[in-house]
């Protein structure tokens, strides 16, 4: 899982490991925390988004890493691994605090995998699992939300919806919402609030969560003509997911080459996302959607054939996810072409009224 | 997309009843929409509605709860008291704005 970044930096690119203090978009200058200044003709911000547990009262404290966990850092994930191995039963609560987060399917995926893990250990009946979310249902878009909600039901996982967390009471082991509902836990797995980099706010480029305000189709930062934000750093109304960054970069590259030559940008990103959701028991599902089309059922990538099934749990989807590990490190990260178009396709999908 | 009549005005709404045309909204309409979901508007409600309407005009999208709290200065706790259970949706509904986009 852990690899050196060095091998992914192409020749001719200088990599500086420095903190950015702020960007002066009027003077086309990046101010580093070290005091050094970098001038630019074009600036591409790709500083992502990060979990910030300190933003939620009561979340960080002596119980963090003991009965309260997150899995978005190596330390968090290994602590959680040990906590699950030592869990003898009780209330497991998975809480998504607020969207957007990076990899929005991850909390559901964790929930399914935890259910499968306890079933395999023969202790499923000793664990009460509850999924607590600020959304109205298991997921945001109606068709996927229903399918995923049914999957929670069939696994006897309780859903606590419309739960907007105000604070965690780590001593009493409970979550408290703004409308004063409470959920007790023995083991809490939380997805903390996600924030973009602080320099984004310092530079006047961000929204309330420090994600860069950009044009949703070209990623040009609002109020500038030579600053772009790509990937999770941008406030696009779609998933903060690797697949989105991948498809977006295909479109961005074409536009950027035009832009630096002074030509108009003629390509528009459609918000395409494509995510596997591991559902445990050796199966996974796959979702494919964009800004305007919600995840639908069907076959992918070859219409009518697959081999992958959209919004349906299959062993083939799980196999696809396993294969994807290799594709990720060897094709996607080095920037090689993946034979999948950036724009979402309706071919092979079943349209529904929802 | 459908047209419905509320308080004598024809308005365009989506499948969930959220208004889709910014300019079709009026203060009288807000009172009717609020009553339809069991809310009697007070000055505190109007502060929220006014912020949402103005923010939408500038930003082109319906403000999130977080934005109403940080940019509008109204505590989240208060939003849950004013628009119980589903404040983000209810605020948008009464303010005649599109249903907030659930980020995915």
Image (spheres, grey):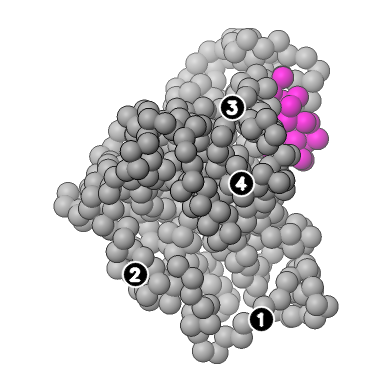
Q: Secondary structure at mark 3?
A: strand
Q: Is residue A238 visible?
A: no
Sequence order check, earlier mark of 2 and 4: 4
Residue that protrudes farthest toward the right in the picture:
A35
Label 2 to label 1: alpha-carbon separation: 28 Å
Tell me the distance, in whole angstroms, between the alpha carbons under discs 4 and 1.
36 Å
Q: Which mark is residue A183?
A: 3
Residue B32 sits in which quadrant?
Answer: top right
One can see residue B103 in this view: yes
The chain letter under disc 4 is: A
Chain of residue at mark 2: A
Protein chain holding label 1: A
Residue wearing tag 4:
A66
Which of A214/A70 is in front? A70
> Quick one: label 2 or label 1, which is nearer the N terminus?
1
Q: Are marks 4 and 1 on the same chain?
A: yes
- Please report contact status of discs 3 and 4: CB closer than 8 Å, yes or no: no
User: Sequence order check: which comes first, mark 4 or mark 1?
Assistant: 1
For disc 2, the marked residue is A326
Q: Residue at the location (61% across, 43% down)? A: A68
Q: Which one is in front, A345 or B66? A: B66
């Amino acid at each position: 899982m852990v690899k050196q970044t060095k091998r992914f930096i192409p020749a001719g690119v200088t990599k500086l490991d420095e903190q950015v203090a702020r960007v002066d978009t009027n003077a086309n200058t990046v101010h580093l925390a070290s005091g050094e200044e970098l001038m630019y003709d074009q600036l591409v911000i790709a500083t992502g988004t990060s979990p910030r547990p300190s933003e939620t009262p009561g979340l960080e404290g002596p119980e963090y890493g003991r009965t309260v966990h997150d899995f978005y850092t190596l330390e968090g994930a290994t602590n959680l691994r040990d906590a699950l191995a030592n869990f003898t039963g009780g209330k497991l609560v998975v809480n998504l605090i607020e969207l957007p987060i990076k990899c929005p399917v991850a909390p559901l995926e964790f929930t399914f995998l935890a259910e499968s893990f306890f079933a395999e250990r023969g202790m499923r009946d000793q664990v009460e699992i509850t999924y607590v979310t600020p959304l109205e249902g298991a997921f945001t878009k109606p068709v996927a939300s229903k399918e995923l909600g049914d999957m929670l039901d069939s696994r006897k996982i309780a859903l606590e919806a419309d739960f907007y967390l105000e604070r965690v009471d780590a001593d009493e082991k409970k979550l408290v919402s703004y409308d004063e509902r409470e959920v007790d836990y023995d083991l809490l797995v939380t997805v903390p609030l996600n924030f973009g980099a602080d320099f984004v706010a310092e530079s006047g480029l961000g929204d309330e969560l420090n994600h860069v305000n950009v044009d949703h189709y070209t990623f040009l930062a609002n109020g500038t003509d030579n600053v772009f934000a790509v990937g999770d750093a941008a406030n696009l109304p779609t998933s903060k997911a690797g697949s989105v960054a991948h498809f977006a970069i295909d479109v961005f590259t074409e536009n950027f080459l035009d832009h630096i030559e002074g030509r108009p940008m003629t390509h528009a990103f459609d918000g395409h996302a494509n995510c596997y959701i591991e559902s445990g028991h050796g199966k996974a599902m796959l979702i494919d959607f964009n800004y305007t089309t919600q995840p639908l059922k069907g076959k992918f990538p070859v219409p009518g054939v697959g081999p992958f099934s959209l919004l349906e749990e299959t062993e083939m989807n799980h196999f696809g996810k396993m294969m994807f590990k290799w594709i990720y490190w060897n094709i996607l990260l080095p920037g090689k072409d993946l034979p999948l178009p950036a724009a979402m396709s309706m071919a092979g999908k079943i349209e529904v009224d929802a | 997309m459908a047209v419905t009549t509320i308080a004598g005005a024809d308005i365009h709404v989506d499948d969930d009843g959220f208004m889709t045309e910014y300019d079709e909204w009026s203060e009288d309409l807000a009172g009717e929409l609020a009553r339809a979901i069991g809310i009697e508007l007070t000055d505190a409600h109007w502060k929220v509605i006014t912020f949402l309407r103005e923010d939408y005009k500038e930003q082109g999208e319906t403000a999130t709860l977080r934005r109403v709290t940080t940019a509008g200065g109204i505590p989240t706790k208060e939003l849950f008291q004013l628009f119980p259970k589903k404040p983000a949706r209810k605020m948008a509904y009464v303010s005649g704005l599109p249903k907030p986009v659930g980020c995915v």
